[in-house]
Image (spheres, grey):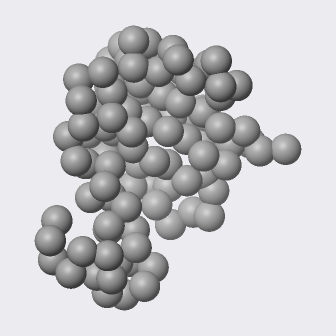
Amino acid sequence: MYKIAVIGAHESIYGFAALGLETYPVQDEDEGRKVLKEVADRDYAVIYITEEMAAKLTDEIDKYRERYLPAIIQIPGVMGNTGAGIKNVKKSVEQAVGADILWRGGI
């Protein structure tokens, strides 16, 4: 059975544990990179990662973009929404469909 993981600063992700998701608090880029590699190679269908941490790990996240699983999805952290998550959704849709069908150049 596949699982769902959440990676980011403790204060941004601790609430997800109450929903039954497995949380992986990380403090810096090196720890985030290590945890992402470990989690992505296990039975996780979805990995949520805070936008702040994802911004530091773009090269690592890009390695998994072509894989079927896991889906790596950016979520806002306690510092707020940077818009990076929605931009990545747009990029993924454009790549899958071959055209901007969501915003027609608006974002």
Residue 62: percent from the left, percent from the top? 39, 55
Which residue sits at x=16%, y=65%? 107
Kindly indicate the quadrant of the structure image that contains residue 30: top left
Examine the rendering and report whether any part of residue 59 can be seen.
Answer: no
Which residue sits at x=70%, y=25%? 20
Q: Which one is in front, 22 or 102? A: 102
Eyeballing the image, is 30 above or below 64? above
Count of numbered marks = 0
- Residue lying at the far right in this picture: please name it: 1
Is residue 5 toward the left or the right of residue 66 in the image? Answer: right
Which residue sits at x=50%, y=55%? 64
Eyeballing the image, is 75 above or below 30? below
Residue 41: percent from the left, percent from the top? 65, 42
Which residue sits at x=65%, y=38%? 4
Q: Which one is in front, 32 or 10? A: 10
- Residue lying at the far left in this picture: please name it: 106
Eyeballing the image, is 104 above or below 62? below
Is residue 74 toward the left or the right of residue 16 in the image? Answer: left
- Residue lying at the far bottom in this picture: please name it: 98
Examine the rendering and report whether any part of residue 49 can be seen.
Answer: yes
Is residue 18 toward the left or the right of residue 63 in the image? Answer: right
Is residue 10 toward the left or the right of residue 80 in the image? Answer: right
Q: Quadrant of the N terminus?
A: top right
Residue 23: percent from the left, percent from the top? 58, 22
Kindly indicate the quadrant of the structure image that contains residue 102: bottom left
